[in-house]
Image: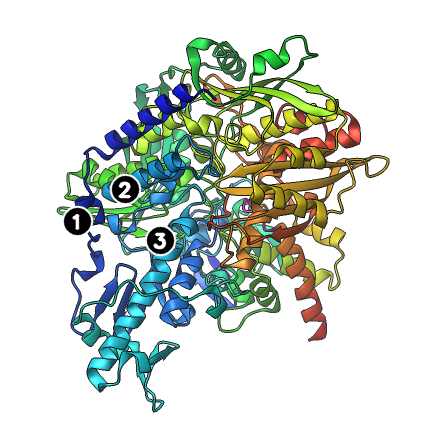
Amino acid sequence: MDLTINGTSHTLELPDDIPLLWALRDGLNITSVKYGCGIAQCGACTVHIGGEAVRSCQVALADVWGEITTIEGLGTPDALHAIQTAWIDHQVAQCGYCQSGQIMQAADLLARNPEPSDEDIDAAMSGNLCRCGTYPRIRAAVHAAASALREV
Amino acid sequence: MGRVRTIARRSFLIGSAAILGGVAFGAYLVTRPTPNPLLDGLGTGEAALTPFVKITPQGITLIVPRADVGQGIASTQAMLIAEELDIDPATATLDPGQPHRAYFNGTVAADGLSFPGWDEGFVAETVRDLMMNVARLSGSQFTGGSSSTADLHETLRQAGATARETLKAAAMARTGVPRADLRTEDGHVILPDGTRIPYTELAGEAAAIEPVTYVALRPASDWTRLGKPHRRLDVGAKSTGTQNYGVDVALPGMLYATVRANPGRGGGMARYSADAALAMMGVRSVVEVNEGLAVIADNTWFAFQAAAALEVDWLPPDYPASSAEMWQALSDAHTEEFQNSRLREDGDVEAALTGATVIEAEYRTPFLAHAALEPLNATVLVEDDAVTIWTATQIPHVVRDAAAEVTGVDAANVILHALPAGGSFGRRLDHDYVVQAIQIAATMPGTPVKTIWSREEDMTHDFPRPLHMARGRGAVAEGRVLACDLDTISPSLISSWFGRVFIVPPGPDAMLVWGAFDQPYAIPNYRVTGYAAPPMMPIGSWRSPGACSNSFFHESFLSELIHAAGADPLEERLRLIEHADSRRVLEAVGDISNWAGADIGPARGRGLAFSYTHGVPVAEVIDVTMTDQGIRIDEVWIAADCGTVFDPVNAEAQLTGAAIFGLGHAMNCELTYENHAVRQTNFHAFEGMRLHQTPRFHTRLLGLAERVRGLGEPATAPAAPALADAIFAATGERLREMPFSRSVDFA
């Protein structure tokens, strides 16, 4: 199976029905993509396929329909994306386990809606669970990232 | 409270403390300096000037022994050392170190006593000191009870100061400049002529001299980092996907495993067949572990699939099969036979209730899962004479000893790589998952095996918060609360949890009544009685144990009494509380919320609750609105006093996060049982709060209390009763049972 992830091609010897989540984590050691529930209830495994946020635990490897972007493709510690900068400035993370998924979901929202209202953020982000309760700072960081991206 | 009874109880506690220590220890033993574990294996040019600071030519390592489970304590520990050491902590390596009694936690032991935190009397303080020494001698290295900052803030600053002054002494020995004329800055000793000597260059010389100890700590007015907004050291990694958790460990040749355990906890296996599982792709073996079976495979997914294919006849455990039977067992334990404690008895409740109009109410809280988002996991490599473990744990000393016990390897040859946890909420105060991972890896010596529980296993095999109920009787007179008699009933958490990770201390289970007996109210006739129901399935510590239920009972019943008296909820609480720190937070929450009573207009309501847990008084005010979609939580105001705040940005996060945790579970979470098994096995049935339900928060930390305390838990307990109180104000309906979604809808 051939995948393009963050612009790089990879070949995987795994069965068709393995969820993309486990192909990425155990097959390619891309561990920023987190397992939280396995049934699309928490959003920790969110990646982009063809620019759209999806739950990688629900996509069989054979069904991947486009190029995959994980948080490493969004930005890195040395070259942060504006959303990551906002996440750091607002010190959103507590345990941090859900935050890659939160950030990928926020990136999807901001690509489609550069100036989201609180209601827009609620609608887009409510599928991403945070057990630590960082939601107030997620809201603030999404607004800040939206402002920063509009100024670019 | 009768004097004779008081003395008898407390004498018994002192006796218990001595038993806990296992020895009648003398002053010599407890005042002897704790050995420094970093001194073993130091190389040339390296120094371990305290158990918390290691300096080599390559850099500075700060030992931060308390587990970071999301509360930010790794960062806070580093900041505390760095303030005195004069380094930028972002340039240091943070290492949790190996479990060692140099890193004992005395505060958590002292807090587990039958004294309210605000009792600073001679007896309470003496017994606390005794328990500190029990912890010191036994090397108990718990992270829990919101105790880390309280326990370590002076130790860590002293460690930084000792290292700094010793480095200056080394510079003095090298240059001849008196130590008093040297200063330090950003990892360097600075000579009067401006010459800068890096600490890393002085390490070897510093190691050769006697450390300079008992250094006076800098006053808060001189702090450059502590108390000021600073960036948590882990937010960069946690915003870029580069933070490694236990679940992310990757080692050459590593295999993957998962566990399938009896859904009835503690029941055994009658028989099983692994044939189907073993025939599946990528499966290496099926092995027996505590509570069930494990599959070892080439990746996690293969292991999950094969675990589901195992055919097992489970034997039933010995606890009641259904929630209805469990509630009945709890109710049946409300008799004198099961009375466990009466740690509060002021005035004469029976006399006050005689002839009065007695107000009665019954409250219930359900079993709850911890459900940290990172499922439980551990990676283990077993070799002939060593065990290496990668996991997140709040009890590293227990994990080390368990590894030695399971494998027969000497405890000194157990290496623990303690990793940050993707949440815990008390779950990693148990080590069942690590023991299973060790059992699994022991079947494949020389091969590292990563064991991950599925979410379903994680929910099914939690040590949940116990179900808990309370019955209150009270009376009011002349517009005031006259009497409050609260009976609180639950299986004993101390018996269950301490039985697994420590020893069960004799005497009453204070945790069963935390959040009730220890509240600083001076109600004229006031009694709190704890009843320990027979054990059911094993239970565990859940963020703010005891108090997460008892505060709901206590504050809700007090609200009912205050309402019956026709008094204002804030004014009456202030009349009933003399404790200065507690009064101030009530006044503060009134101030920031512009408190003017519970009535804030049509279809709206305002609630108030107060609790004193983990040494921190917290008051919360909540506003709700009834909408077409259900009840919406609009605003939450939180005032608290944990003494000096070292890390204000994170402190605010802990207050709001803990409140969201309390609110979310109160809204819609419960574990119920059928055929001995948990019915809620994933987040579709155990949601908690989601972003669209999140209110706006306003917080104030007073910073006036004399003692420094921690904030990981304290804002949890008052959240549920404040919400119930707000819903009553809006709807007229008293919610006496969690989750509230049993009675109302939330938007």
Task: Identify the chain of the residue marked 2, using the numbered disc in the image.
Answer: B
Question: Secondary structure under badge 2?
Answer: helix
Q: Residues within 10 Å of mark 1 (few under 14, many from 20)?
A: some
Q: Residue at x 44, y 59 (%)?
A: B75
Q: Which residue is mark 2?
A: B133
Residue B419 falls left or right of residue B744: left
Q: Residue at x 33, y 55 (%)?
A: B96
Q: Quadrant of the C terminus of chain A?
A: bottom right
- Judge depth for marks 1 and 2 and give the one in front: 2
Residue type (three-letter) at the residue carrying disc 3: Val
Q: Which residue is mark 3?
A: B249
| Bounds of the magenta segment | A130-134
Q: CA distance from mark 3 to mark 1?
A: 21 Å
Looking at the image, residue B737 lies above or below residue B70: above
Residue type (three-letter) at the residue carrying disc 1: Asn
Q: CA distance from mark 1 to mark 2?
A: 27 Å
State whether discs 3 and 1 lie on one chain.
yes
Residue type (three-letter) at the residue carrying disc 2: Asn
